[in-house]
Structures are given as C-alpha cells and as structure tokens.
Amino acid sequence: MGTATVGFEKLTIRILDDKEPTLGTNLFEIKGKANEGATSSAKISGLAVDPVKSWGSNKPYHISGKGVGDGKVDFDILDIPDKVLAAIIGYDVDTNGVITASSETKAPNCSILIEDSDIRGDKVMLGFLSGVFSYDGVEIDTAQGKASEMKADTLSYSVGSSDTGEFFKKYAGSESAAQAAVRTALSMTVAG
C-alpha cells in the first residue's frame, strides 16, 4: 500500500449487521492477547483494475482503467478463536458450543481494519469497507516428538464496496481525529 510498515499488529473485524458494534459479538480484535488469536500475515492483492485498450488508427486510442479491481486479502491468523471464526464465516453455534456448517451457511458482510506502525513510528490503518470471509480448511499433522511452531489458519477476505462505491480507507499518521474517522467509516466506533 505504499507505506513501509514494520509488522502486522492488529486486525479488527466488524460484522455489518445493522446493530451497534459490541466487542466480542459483532466486533472482534485479533491482536496477540492470550487465547484470542494473533496476526501473522496479510497479503493484499487485486486492488488495481485491469486496463482495457481500445485500438484505433493502428495504435492504442483510449485506455480505460477506472475503479478498483477484484480485491482480496489472504490472512494467516494464529489461534483464531472458534467463536470468532464461526461468526465471520457464518457457521451456526448452538448453546452447547457445537459448531455446524450446512447448505444454508452464508458468510456475513464484514468490514476489516489492518493496523500497525510505519518506520517513522506513525500509526498505519488500512480498512476495507465491505467484504466476506472464506475458510477453505484445516491442516492436521501428527506429533513428531519435538516442539514445532504453531500453524496459522488461512482465511481469505473478498473485498466488496460500500453503498457509496468506496472500497478502502487508508491513513498513516498520528492525528487521532483522522484515526477516528477511519474507524467510523468502517462502523467500528463503540459507543461509550
């Protein structure tokens, strides 16, 4: 995104359900807190629209390339809680905590906010206003009698747009008003 970040500190996910944002219900933070998951990596792709050339008089006469491409974010998340994964994928969870996927499973529309700091120490915020998560599967290996690094779960986020046609918001700096504006645009402002 043109900003020299130093890592991937935090991911905030907001289920866009027309209800007030409530932490742990429709607003989730993945930030390395014990037993609440940690961010590992995010690969953002597809933000550029593929230009289309119209040829005339033996040369490119017009090049159209308006808008944003087919955006996607692939996340590696360590130890994502089942409750969070179920909520953002659309799985049903019963009163006993049993998670069920069915032919009726549908991922809810979500906004996301990726946060870290840049090489100058300023906060970097990249938020996508709309999209849905998908989770293709899990990899399970046998224990081999030695310690190994924890494996990340891979989730994909297909970027959509807001009702006004906006795809993402980005801010790098230290101004709290600008940071609040990004959170408000993503419907992540908790009343209080």
Image (cartoon, rainbow, N blue to C red):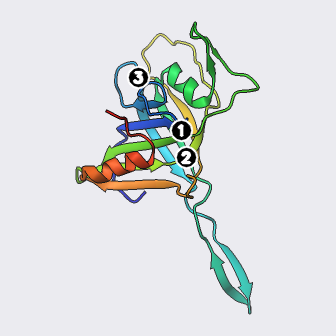
**Amino acid type of disc 1?**
Leu
Distance from the alpha carbon under mark 3 to that under mark 2:
23 Å
Residue annotated with mark 3: 36
Please give the count of numbered marks on the rendered protein.
3
For the N terminus, the quadrant is: bottom left
Distance from the alpha carbon under mark 3 to that under mark 1:
21 Å
Q: Is residue 109 above or below residue 77?
A: below
Work out whether residue 6 can be spotted. Answer: no
Earlier-in-chain disc, 3 versus 1: 1
Point out which mark residue 130 bears: 2
Q: Residue at x 54, y 42 (%)?
A: 74
From the image, state whether disc 3 or disc 2 is nearer to you.
2
Q: How far from the left and from the top, in percent, is residue 153?
A: 53, 29
From the image, state whether disc 1 or disc 2 is nearer to you.
1
Write down the quadrant of residue 40 in the picture: top left
Task: Indicate the secondary structure of the residue bearing disc 3.
Answer: loop
Single out the residue that lies furthest toward the bottom.
57
**Amino acid type of disc 3?**
Glu
Q: How far from the left and from the top, in percent, is residue 27?
A: 45, 31
From the image, state whether disc 3 or disc 1 is nearer to you.
1
In front of the other: 8 or 145:
8
In the displayed structure image, the side of residue 9 where residue 142 appears, left or right: right
Point out which mark residue 96 bears: none
Distance from the alpha carbon under mark 1 to that under mark 2:
8 Å
Residue annotated with mark 1: 16
Task: Indicate the secondary structure of the residue bearing disc 2.
Answer: loop
**Amino acid type of disc 2?**
Ser
Q: Residue at x 56, y 62 (%)?
A: 48
Earlier-in-chain disc, 3 versus 2: 3
Q: Are marks 3 and 2 in contact (CB under 8 Å)?
A: no
Q: Are marks 1 and 2 in contact (CB under 8 Å)?
A: yes
In front of the other: 95 or 12:
95
